[in-house]
Image: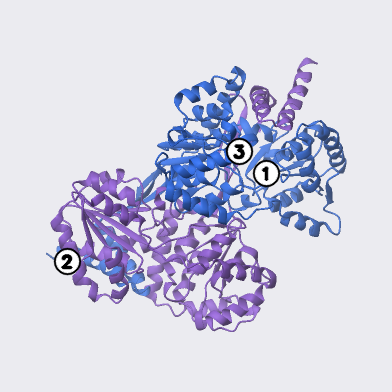
Chain colours: A purple, B blue
């Protein structure tokens, strides 16, 4: 049985707060190692990529072998079964359709003073996507990162993926192909991040780097931030389910376990207004858990971080959920739309009993790269916005400058910035002289 | 005379590349000091704020004196002249009007499979704005940070501002008042950032921290990132002007100097197709510079980083500008709209000879917090989006789950995530049984 809390208990607040502040991740301090790799990469380029790939991935490469050739990609992709290809294509199309609607619009208007104002969105020129190797090489993550970039209009899209022993998951290559990726390199780790940020003889630098990775990759992303843009640094995954009434305990148990099987550090929380349902779900988890191939991982997550909370009513459940600010929020209640309006902090909300979180990982359309570790309080999942930037625009007529320029001069004077004021004054003086002629 | 480059020169590319990669800022390594302050603040709260305020600002406070009272604010604000108040109010209104147009819209639609998809924007619950003390206490920056937060709908808006010797710029308090700030604390430095991120007995924690500051403040923002959201870490300011034809050299010189007077590390660049104009502007800078109160700062910036580039044509000028990706881009040319479409990377564009960059610092309406140090390649200026986050929404009907669920099961199987697939399968099985009944 996991921790079960009841909001009526005297020690509830203490125990809930402890759960919120529990650190679920050991962040090994790899900063020094990573900064050494970055410095070395900047000094010696491709040679470092080849050396470290030989060392960590047991793969001997020369610089001309760093990049997958079209023939190599075609040969791998040909191994994908028709069913897998169809499933991946369906996912790609649905993700593309969802993200196409996110494209923001440019704006331009002229105000009564004669100032024409607005903004314009443009894509980043080049983006790089990191794809972890081995077991964590999820083709779905390739789609979720690369498609928003392509929809945004990114000109050049690069993937770096380690291939331990030279082995690659062909679905990863197919996902890259379906997403319109331009270049795929068989390099991983901090050196791949450094190569995309600074460039080597073979890999031209990009402007933005996204994608998940281990502690070395995360540290490298933090260190190159500023030189390039990065997406969030993802923590362990989490789900919070609010359930009431006549819900199927097995379905809820499977949703909790689907989160738990990702990672021993993942967290699954059930908040229910019905103690009997809470009990039934806990029992279903215990029954199903041993049947899972990843029972060890899911079991550790459920044992260490799994939580069932009995709440008085749905208002209380929503308030507790907002304090967690979960990455994934499932609302298995009679009126999920009404409850959703009361939940303000969540990365993604899944409404109703027929929207298991797992469909969101693959095929529903919204992005599965979402804010973890309570950061949904202030941040959003990956979107086309991550691959766009906004330039503000202003054009003043002489009349507009005459109308608002004096206020700028006044404020510049109050801030002690004389040239600021003089740059406005010189223009206003010329306008006055012209008017006086 | 500053560096003058001509794109026809044989060594142009080398010298331009050197200019791009020149480091304009000495970033003192204050990380250890800052992490000590943060740890101390977390352990001892208000006591640390009072001790460090006594030490750095020569101001003895007790916890009940950390926050400005309404009476104290009113007394300071009463000292502002009517003209300054009118100018600040005009700026606030124009900034509010511009940012109100940035509010993004929620979306919801139902696709042919029966999936209702969409997203919803919600504001962060609480935001904190850091305002530097002393000479860098710009009331305009208070408006530029606080108004977007208020427009976004942030529930609680906090300002921390150091008051060395107990002195505060009354315009800063007025700007906070005009922006709708809820709480103002007389604390600064890394300890103020730590207090807003972690909270103390007196200051409740916030979810997002924005605003400029010195190296200690910047380091503290980096360290609390993740616990709270932060805006960008700003580098030295920069302007790039593209000019052709009959432009007034004095106006251009003043615009270059307005940037240079901010900071000895600021950079002012002129690209012109007319060598005679370049020469005339250089002469005007030399003539005007000694007349400025901040001549020492502006002179150092112009000497060390000022650059005039003679380009063949406007296409070449636009391409060079994109490589700089300037924070501020002024287009003093006959058809600035046409040239603007060819410049893809810039924080803000000022079109035409009557739109000096200085109006953008104060009154034109767009934000003056903009990406520096080439980061306009991948990031945008401050906006209401910085105080909002997006939650994605999905609701599947049983029919939608039947349509797209099998693809999710297939992909889950390919990624080895059995509980993911089982969570879909259990629901589909129940649907099939119901249909069979």
Chain under numbered label 2: A
* Alpha carbon distance from label 2 to label 3: 57 Å
Write the residue at 81% across / 49% down.
B311
Q: Nearer the viewer, mark 1 or mark 3?
A: 1
Q: Earlier in the sequence, mark 1 or mark 3?
A: 1
Label 2, on which residue?
A283
* Closer to us: A10 or A387: A10
Neighbours of disc 2 within 10 Å: few (<14), some (14-19), many (20+)? some
User: So how many labels did they put on this image?
Assistant: 3
Above/below status of B180 relative to B335? above
Label 2, secondary structure: give it: helix
Q: Which mark is residue B368?
A: 3
Q: Is residue B253 left or right of residue A111?
A: right
Location of residue A3 with respect to B74 vertically, above or below: below
Can residue B196 be seen here?
Answer: yes
Q: Nearer the viewer, residue B208 or A344?
A: B208
Same-subunit check for callouts 2 and 1: no
Is the C terminus of chain B in the top left, top right, bottom left or bottom right quadrant? bottom left
């Amino acid at each position: 049985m996991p921790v079960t809390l009841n909001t009526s208990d005297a020690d509830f607040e203490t125990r809930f707060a402890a759960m919120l502040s529990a650190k679920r991740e050991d962040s090994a301090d790899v900063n020094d190692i990573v900064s050494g790799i970055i410095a070395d990469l900047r000094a010696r380029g491709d040679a470092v990529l080849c050396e470290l790939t030989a060392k960590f991935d047991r793969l001997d490469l020369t610089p001309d072998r760093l990049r997958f050739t079209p023939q190599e990609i075609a040969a791998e992709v040909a191994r994908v079964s028709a069913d897998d290809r169809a499933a991946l294509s369906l996912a790609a199309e649905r993700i593309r359709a969802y993200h196409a609607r996110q494209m923001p619009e440019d704006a331009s208007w002229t105000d009564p003073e004669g100032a024409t104002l607005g903004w314009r969105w443009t894509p980043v020129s080049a983006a790089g996507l990191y794809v972890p190797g081995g077991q964590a090489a999820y083709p779905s993550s390739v789609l979720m990162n690369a498609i928003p970039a392509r929809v945004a209009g990114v000109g050049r899209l690069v993937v770096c993926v380690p291939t331990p022993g030279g082995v690659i998951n062909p679905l990863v290559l197919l996902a890259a192909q379906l997403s319109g990726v331009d270049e795929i390199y068989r390099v991983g780790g901090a050196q791949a991040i450094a190569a995309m940020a600074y460039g080597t003889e073979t890999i031209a630098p990009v402007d933005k780097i996204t994608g998940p990775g281990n502690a070395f990759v995360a540290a490298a992303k933090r260190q190159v931030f500023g030189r390039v843009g990065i997406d969030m640094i993802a923590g362990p995954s989490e789900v919070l389910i609010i359930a009431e009434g006549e819900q199927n305990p097995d379905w809820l148990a499977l949703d909790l376990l689907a989160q738990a099987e990702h990672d021993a550090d993942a967290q699954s929380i059930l908040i229910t207004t019905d103690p009997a349902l809470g009990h039934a779900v806990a029992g279903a988890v215990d029954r199903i858990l041993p049947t899972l191939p990843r029972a060890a991982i899911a079991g550790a997550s459920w044992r260490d971080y799994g939580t069932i909370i009995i709440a008085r009513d749905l208002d209380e459940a929503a308030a507790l959920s907002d304090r967690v600010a979960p990455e994934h929020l499932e609302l298995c209640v009679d009126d999920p739309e009404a409850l959703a309006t009361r939940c303000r902090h969540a990365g993604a909300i899944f409404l109703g009993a027929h929207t298991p979180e797992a469909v969101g990982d693959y095929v529903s359309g919204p992005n599965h790269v979402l804010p973890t570790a309570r950061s949904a309080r202030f941040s959003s999942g990956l979107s086309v916005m991550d691959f766009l930037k906004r330039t503000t625009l202003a054009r003043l007529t002489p009349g507009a400058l005459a109308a608002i320029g004096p206020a700028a001069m006044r404020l510049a004077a109050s801030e002690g910035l004389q040239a600021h004021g003089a740059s406005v004054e010189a223009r206003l003086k010329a306008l006055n002289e012209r008017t006086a002629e």
